Image: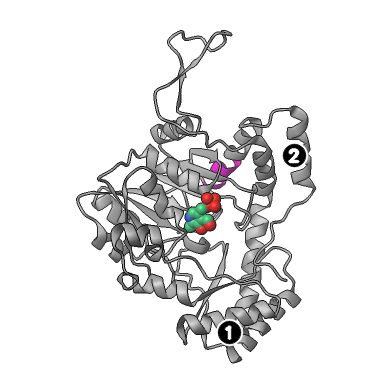
Amino acid sequence: MMNLTFPEFDDEEIKNLQQCLDSKWVTQGPFTKKFEGLFAARHQVKHALATTSCTAALHLATLALDLKPGDEVIIPALTWVTSAHAAEYVGAKAVFAEIEADTFNLDPKAFEAAITPRTKAVVAVHLFGLAANMGELMRIAKKHNVAVIEDAACATGTTYNGKPVGSTGDLGCFSFHPRKVVTTGEGGMVTTENDALAAKVASLRNHGSTGPGPLGDPTRPYHMGTFNMLGFNLRLSDIQAAVGVAQMAKLDRLLAERQTLVARYRELLSNVDEIALPAVPKGCGHTYQSFVLRVLKGGRDRRNAVMNHMQKAGIQTRPGTHAVHRLGYYANKYGLKPEMFPIAANAEDTTITLPLFPGMTEADLKVVSDALKESLRG
Ligand SMILES: Cc1ncc(COP(=O)(O)O)c(C=O)c1O
């Protein structure tokens, strides 16, 4: 079976892991600090704070922005479910808005139309690694005084108009799940330029620790910190960060390799008129964390038949992602109907993610492309 993706590890990860284990310091520590420093430099942000997942990063972002019951957070209707859960974790309401059919990202016009006096934030998702239209989204958010959380789970290392994602909104959230461009097994990162938000995230991921206690001197053996916030343990371990440091050194090569592979996929599939290949608007970078195409005719049944055929040919595929408004939690809680966001619903039903991973050969690309063409014929 050819998997959708495989992470790439080599001696560097093993060397760092050995060093971490030998040091006997395995919780958040020196490797985490190094990982955060590399990540902040690469994304041109003042602060990068490692955490256990992108979901945790999104949760920390909604906590740091002090979102609460009565507040509304606008989420693109097509995304991973936790882009929306983060609002719900803090009692705010996830409000969905339609996506653009060609980019799968939040439609700025739909975002503006969904704003109410209760709107406090928007989650600008860079879906599948394609930078969202940050120019328009930021303009609208500023006009209505709405905070921007960039969900860059799939977008480590990419840019919008030359500026790294995660550096424009109030906070950026990244994922290091194994299906992402770089991985720490599980893991995430919060980025921000804002000192106060960074301090809040640092405290909230560490049980809500708010610094030295009234007795002051942290060098004293009796010293105990203060906890003035309801925090969580969302720290990344140094074992994971040791892998992250090695992965960051590969990031640019891995991104370049994905571009090369996609360029070849585009050639091999250029004459297949029954599919739409991913659109990349000018100025929007794409990591191709997922290479997602759309089957143009025949709806979900045809798409499913194509995927079944690919599976029989030994090739793993997946739908792009969820139309979140159709999932039980949201549909039941807010009485949402599938037809409310037809573009998102159609995107879930008609998309296919093809295998894409470092080390993929010309033969692999041909096998997948030929199987896809054959499946479309069948
Ligand atoms: C857009 C988006 N947001 C958030 C997440 C959650 O990331 P994690 O698995 O690190 O919690 C994902 C994961 O696939 C994602 O694709």
**Label 2: few (<14), some (14–19) or many (≥20) C-alpha neighbours in 10 Å:** many
**Residue farthest along the bottom direction in this orientation:** 377
Front: mark 2 or 1: 2
The verdict on label 2 being within 8 Å of ligand 1 is no
How far from the left and from the top, in percent, is residue 52? 56, 42
Q: Dot 2 corresponds to which residue? A: 17
Nearest the viewer among 33 and 353 is 353
27 shown above or below 159: above
Residue 228 lies in the magenta-colored region: no
Q: Residue at x 33, y 38 (%)?
A: 66
| For residue 146, side relative to residue 54 (left or right) | left
The image quadrant that residue 110 belongs to is bottom left
Q: Which quarter of the rendered picture does the C terminus lie within? A: bottom right
Residue 40 lies in the magenta-colored region: yes
Label count reads 2
For the residues labelled 2 and 1, the Cα–Cα distance comes to 43 Å
Q: Residue at x 64, y 51 (%)?
A: 183
Q: Main secondary structure of the magenta part?
A: helix
**Which labelled disc corresponds to residue 270?**
1
Q: Earlier in the sequence, mark 2 or mark 1?
A: 2
How far from the left and from the top, in percent, is residue 326? 39, 66
Amino acid type for the residue under numbered disc 1: Ser
Q: Which residues are magenta?
A: 38-43
Answer yes or no: is residue 133 visible.
Answer: no
Amino acid type for the residue under numbered disc 2: Leu
325 shown above or below 198: below
